[in-house]
Image (cartoon, rainbow, N blue to C red):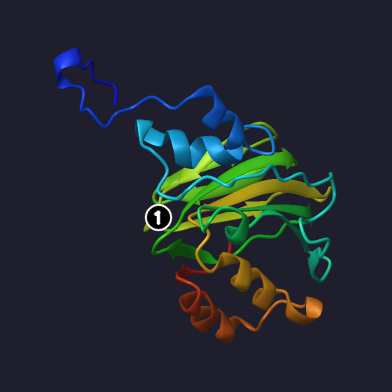
Amino acid sequence: MGQTTSKSEVAPEAVSISVATMNRRAFVGAAVGAIPVMACGQKATFPAASSPLFVKSGSSVDDDVLQLGDRSFLHFKVCGRHTHGGQLLIEQSQLRRFGPPRHLHFEQDEWFYPLAGTFHIEVGDEQFELRPGDFLFAPRGVPHVWKHLEEDPGRMLVAFLPAGKMESFFRRFTQGGVMPAQKELPALFLEHGMQVVGPPL
């Protein structure tokens, strides 16, 4: 990327994506599909879903909103079973000065898109402050951590590419509506393809 390429250097398989394909992959708008399909001009690893999926504001695709005490609500917008394992998109709402421990994903890239509130996010050695409309991509294998910074509730879209075991992780993590004990987190993360590498912010 960032380099010019002559026509003779273009590989035969570098076929442009049609407008119809773009529409199928549109992120409950554009973002969900655009990242895995278009990143670096590569084709998606996973086949496209064959039908649209509509989820109302404030709802979850299965109408089951998960709750973690008074810290966060989790809304599943699109899951691995809808995308042949390609991605999981969640909306976290009612966030109040909360965030996960520092961790990394073995097999998933992750991106963040705040809808309300301010978030401090660290990816590797870099630090970012995200506000509504900002976007941040965190590649797999790189430690990252984030936290909502304000008293007023925050909301953020978070996607995992591919979906992996993340839906199962969130369902386990929110069982009973209370956060698991700190001593249980390393094993729970590892079981779902992640590794805890540090405390929360």
The quarter of the picture where residue 177 lies is bottom right
Q: Position of residue 96 (x, y in %)?
A: 78, 56
Residue 6 visible in the snapshot: no
At x 52%, y 45%, the residue is 48
Picture residue at 76% right of the left edge, 44% below the top: 54
Does residue 24 show up?
yes
Q: Position of residue 133 (x, y in %)?
A: 66, 31
Q: Quadrant of residue 95?
A: bottom right
Which residue is nearer to you in this view: 101 or 74? Answer: 74
Q: Establish if 110 lies above or below 3.
A: below
Location of residue 85 with respect to 191 vertically, above or below: above
- Give the left or right position of residue 147, taking residue 65 as reference: left
Residue that badge 1 annotates: 140
Q: Nearer the viewer, residue 166 or 101?
A: 166
- Please identify the residue farthest to the left as the structure is shown: 8
Query: Measuring 60% from the left and 81% from the top, which residue is drawn there?
Result: 182
Q: Is residue 85 left or right of residue 99?
A: left
The amino acid on which the numbered mark 1 sits, given as a three-letter code, is Arg
How far across and how far down the image is residue 37, in percent?
A: 46, 38
Which quadrant: the N terminus? Answer: top left
Across and down, in percent, residue 53 comes to: 71, 46
Q: Residues within 10 Å of mark 1 (few under 14, many from 20)?
A: some
